[in-house]
Image (cartoon, rainbow, N blue to C red):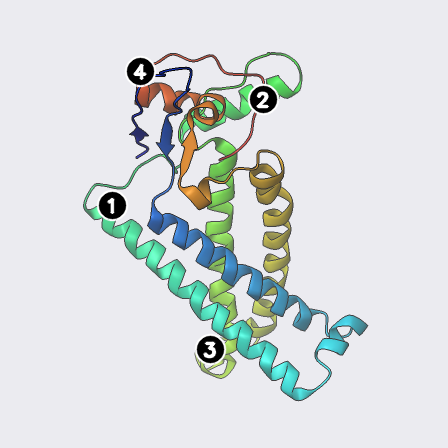
Amino acid sequence: MSAVNSAAPTTRGVQVVRLFTRFTRGQRWEHWLLFGSFVVLFLTGIVQKYRTESWSQSILSTPDRLELIRNIHHIAAIVLTLEVLYHLGHGIYLMARRKLSHAIFPEWQDVKDAGHMIKYLLFLTKKLPKYGKFNFEQKLTYWFLFFSIGLMVITGFIIWFPIQVTSLLPGSIIPAAKLTHSTEAIVAGIFVLIWHLYHVVLERLNLSMFTGRLNEDDMRKYHAAEYERLTGEATDTPDQGGQA
């Protein structure tokens, strides 16, 4: 749950800005482990997918280089898998203790917000919807990557251990897993680079994943409903949008 870091009133012409907790330290570590391992997997995987290309052949010019790239890919895959298992396990633990926030789960309000956003983009309204802790775009990002990474983990281990897998399943599952794994990796990579990084870094220069906090202005602009819930103060939604 988001929290407010209380600040003293403005004194002697100095304006004190309230800060709102956005991500815990554990969540930030998870994010960067996920991002780092994903980038390594994408770069080492794309080289192997396009081995017939000249740039790939220059990188994989010797068997030793190919083996090194594969080893790096596998190490990053283990890191990613452990992160996924921890994320799932921690989520299940919080659910069992009834401490898991529902903020990240899709709900009917997200459909309403999406419709409101379409009206805004079509100049049918001048006001953006008042978002809670996570808006519908952020939930789409989370759940798309959740299932995408899960699919890549499963197909990745099928490719890694083909003998063991084909002792239980038909051999046709291996080429199917290869196609699914590489295609999904490219789709996820494009999604992260174009969609997620644009909204977070280029559009708003959002640093909350580093600091764990958002200032009061950003909360009022981009998470007005959450701001009102935490402070009890009404706010008008400005005519601009973004993600945090």
Say which element carries label 1: helix
Mark 2 highlights which residue?
Answer: 240
Q: Could you give the CA–CA distance between mark 3 and mark 4, rounded to whole angstroms?
A: 56 Å
Q: Which mark is residue 232?
A: 4
Mark 3 highlights which residue?
Answer: 165
Q: Earlier in the sequence, mark 1 or mark 4?
A: 1
Vertical relation: 213 (above or below) 187? above
Mark 1 highlights which residue?
Answer: 95
Give the x, y percent position of residue 105.
Answer: 38, 37
Q: Mark 3 is on which residue type?
A: Val
Q: Mark 1 is on which residue type?
A: Met
**Farthest residue toward the front?**
12
Give the x, y percent position of residue 194.
Answer: 65, 45
Question: Circle 1: is it few (<14), some (14-19), or many (20+) Cα within 10 Å?
Answer: few
Q: Earlier in the sequence, mark 3 or mark 2?
A: 3
Q: Earlier in the sequence, mark 3 or mark 4?
A: 3
Residue drawn at (64%, 57%) of the image = 186
